[in-house]
Amino acid sequence: MSGATSLRTFFQVVLPLLGPVLVVVATQRFLFASNQTSTIILLATTDTQTISLLTINYIFQGLRESAAVTTVIITVLTVIAALVARRFGSRGVGVA
């Protein structure tokens, strides 16, 4: 847009174009997560419990704060794994 600030251009041009893409990505992520729930449930035994199942149990018991803490733990572990994979995965590819 001629004469518009970059912020206004973002909100009036870029964001409306990204809207449908964001909906599709969110839907796919939800479907992937719900598909993996059955795998997580199969990994659980009476003696052990995955963090994802612990979060679900906390939600059903009404312990939202505990569920939020376990979700933050999952997020932090995922970010750390992604950063490590990015760090070591870029070696040998020629990416600086």
Image: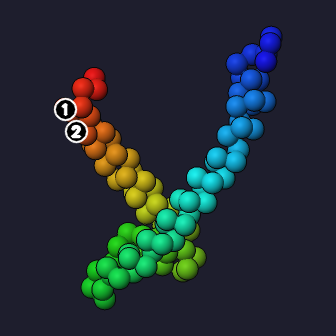
Q: Return the residue nearer the eye: 25 or 53.
A: 25
Is 5 drawn above or below residue 37 in the view shown?
above
Task: Measure how far apart labels 2 and 1 are at the Cα level.
Answer: 9 Å
The reply to whether residue 69 is visible in this rendering is: no
Res 88 label: 2
Instruction: Name the secondary structure under disc 2.
Output: helix
Is residue 90 shown left or right of residue 52?
left
Residue at (35, 53) in percent of width and height: 77
**Residue occupying the far bottom of the picture:** 46
Residue at (31, 49) in percent of width and height: 81
Residue designated by label 1? 92
Res 32 label: none
Amino acid bearing label 1: Gly
The reply to whether residue 38 is visible in this rendering is: yes
Amino acid bearing label 2: Phe
Q: Neighbour class for label 2 at 10 Å: few (<14), some, many (≥20)?
A: few
Which quadrant would residue 12 be assigned to in this image? top right
